Amino acid sequence: MIPDTNVVIAYLEGEDAVVQTLSQWRDNASLLLPTVVESEVLSFNAWDETERRITEQYLADNFISIVFDRPIAHVAAQIRRTTRIKFPDAAIAASALYLRLPLITRNLRDFKRIPGLDLRTI
């Protein structure tokens, strides 16, 4: 499973449904985190420097990092050409498509336009 930025932030903010669901999924499978999601999460302005360091450590300890490399970049470019969604969303979707994994998101509006993307929501 690959969580979108909004799901990771909801988890870190302690939203019960998200914490419970992600914890269950993590117990049954690895959670992978695209570096684009990590960048978006760490740029979230609501945290002070201590919270940001704790978040960095949490992400490192609980997710397998998925680097935005050339093959994923090509998939993202194709998504952007055909759907015109923003780059971060295209990169996140491309990671899920390339790895053939479901994307967990609350942003169904943008992602539902991407053919073949397995979407899950919390």
Image (tube, grey):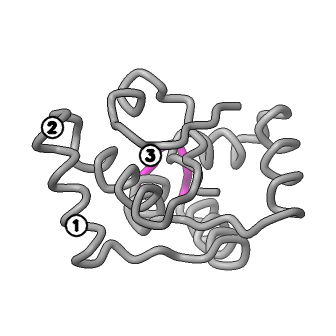
Which amino acid type is marked by label 2? Answer: Thr
Q: Residue at x 40, y 64 (%)?
A: 98
**Nearest-to-viewer mark from 1 and 3:** 1
Magenta region, main secondary structure: loop
Q: Which residue is mark 3?
A: 45
- Check residue 30 for magenta coloring: no
Q: Earlier in the sequence, mark 2 or mark 1?
A: 1
- In the image, the segment drawn in magenta is 43-48
Q: Which residue is mark 1?
A: 73
Q: Quadrant of residue 119?
A: top right
Secondary element at image label 2: helix
Image coordinates of residue 24 in percent, x first then y, are: 88, 52
Using the numbered discs, state the Cα–Cα distance from disc 2 to disc 1 in whole angstroms: 14 Å
Q: Which residue is mark 2?
A: 82
Using the numbered discs, state the Cα–Cα distance from disc 1 to disc 3 in whole angstroms: 27 Å
101 lies above or below 19? below
**Is 39 or 29 nearer to us in this picture?**
29
Image coordinates of residue 18 in percent, x first then y, are: 76, 38
Which amino acid type is marked by label 3? Answer: Asn
Find residue 2 and name its label: none
Q: Are marks 1 and 3 in contact (CB under 8 Å)?
A: no
Secondary element at image label 1: helix
Which amino acid type is marked by label 1? Answer: Ala
Q: Give the quarter of the figure containing the C terminus.
A: top right
